[in-house]
Image (spheres, grey):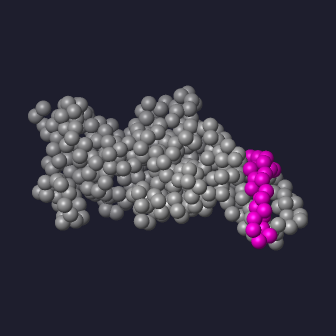
Amino acid sequence: MAKTIRIGFLGFGTVGTGAFRMLQDNRDAIVKKIGLSFEVAKIGIKDTSKERGVDPSLFTTDLDSIVNDPTIDVVIEVIGGVDPAARLVEAALKHGKHVVTANKELIAKHGSRLVHLAKSKGLDLHYEAAVGGGIPLIQPLKHQLAGNDLVRMMGILNGTTNYILTMMEEEEADYSDALREAQEKGYAEADPTNDVEGIDTGYKISILASIAGGKQVAVNEVYREGISKVSATDIAYAASWGYRIKLLGIAEMIGEAVRVRVHPTMIPLTHPLASVNGVYNALWIHGDFVGDVMFSGRGAGSDPTGSAVIGDFLDVGRNIFAGGSGSAIPYDEGMKTAPMDDLETTYYLRIQVEDKPRTLGEISMVFGRHEISIAEMQMRTLPSEKGEIVCLTHKAKESAVQAALAEVQWLPCVSKVATTIRVETA
């Protein structure tokens, strides 16, 4: 055990402190599992004035000094975002350092290029913590499930939105009230846009789809809707029909292409994902040989995500001990994506109307022209001579539904199309 692995941290926020604490608290077990000792050599931060409970001599604001230091073997990148993370990770690899990152945006946008670079240098680049926090998702896709054609994936990949939707159901709260509660409890940021508009989930499902498909899915090819238009009324209607609303990231293979989408989704109460509540995350996978598999657990936070970072570090350390070349598994760029317009699924529609004769008939005529048939329907009277038509369609094409709704909303009898939610039955 002559060699000591020297580690440099880029960033020391929630994830970084969790990973650092695990290295310290479980040092003996980690050394035993790797076969080599280790030490944290430097920690790159922005603000040195903040008290962190760690030897202050470890901290530096010169992040380049970490990736350029020839004595550092492993860089742990937990800054987040692309700038300056992409430049620093690339520099670390070019200087012969293994990299562990928890940066979902970085991998979603630059994963293929960086993993190819790592492979060309005989280095590791691992990113388990980028998706699912403490839930092992990346490694099973790259290894245990790699022999399968992964036909479909559906995931609750953001704890903030899952908590909000859970509170809306359990407390019959409006979206704004549930969001405020999530912010008060520290589950949502002051600016929750990345979470509630599906951006965070979009990064994560694109990474999973890239691994499964063997080519990087461009982030701008991911269809995305958030949860801000979901109301307690929609959640109640869903429950009355035996469904629950979740924000899902969905990837499905369509021949040689993949369709990747993020949006609120109604799923049957009998589906395994329907019982995943609060801040928990889960990924459901259907493979051609393995069948249905689901992973679930705490998807964010200092300890779970830090655990995933250190799990990756152990893989790197074992590789250093064995003296082997890097185990990074590259994937190419240019994954072909199937258009959202060609999606065929069931739809939940809530339309507010004038409470007048022939209203239902006029709407039905529009649906009929677009070959959309209704499976179930509820109607109720609202105050001020308004009404509400709520329905589930039979399977219909996305392009047809959007065209019909664009036409419906201009009918004199229609006040507005309040909600459109896609329904997944399997």
Q: Is residue 382 magenta?
A: yes
Quadrant where the image shows the C terminus: top right
Name the residue nearer the viewer: 9 or 90: 9
Query: What kind of secondary structure does the magenta stretch mostly adopt?
Result: strand
* Residue 112 inside the magenta-drawn segment: no
Position in image of residue 91 (x %, y %): 26, 55
Please tell me whether residue 211 is drawn above or below residue 349 in the rendered image.
above
Asked whether the viewer can see residue 333, the reply is no
Residue 204 appears left or right of 120? right
The x and y percentages for residue 98 are: 26, 45
- What residue do we see at 49% from left, 52% from top? 163
Q: Residue at x 23, y 31 (%)?
A: 33
The quadrant holding residue 242 is top right
Q: At which x and y percent is residue 409?
A: 75, 67
Q: Quadrant of the N terminus?
A: top left
How many marks are shown on the rendered structure? 0
- Residue drawn where x is 15% and y is 37% of the image: 37
Residue sticking out furthest to the top: 289
Residue drawn at x 62%, y 59% as measured from the top left: 231
Residue 51 visible to an observer of this rendering: yes
* Residue 167 located left or right of residue 81: right
Q: Is residue 370 left or right of residue 293?
A: right
Q: Can you give x and y, in whole percent of width and height, for residue 299 in the image?
A: 42, 46
- Give the extent of the magenta segment: 373-396
Q: Is residue 88 left or right of residue 364?
A: left
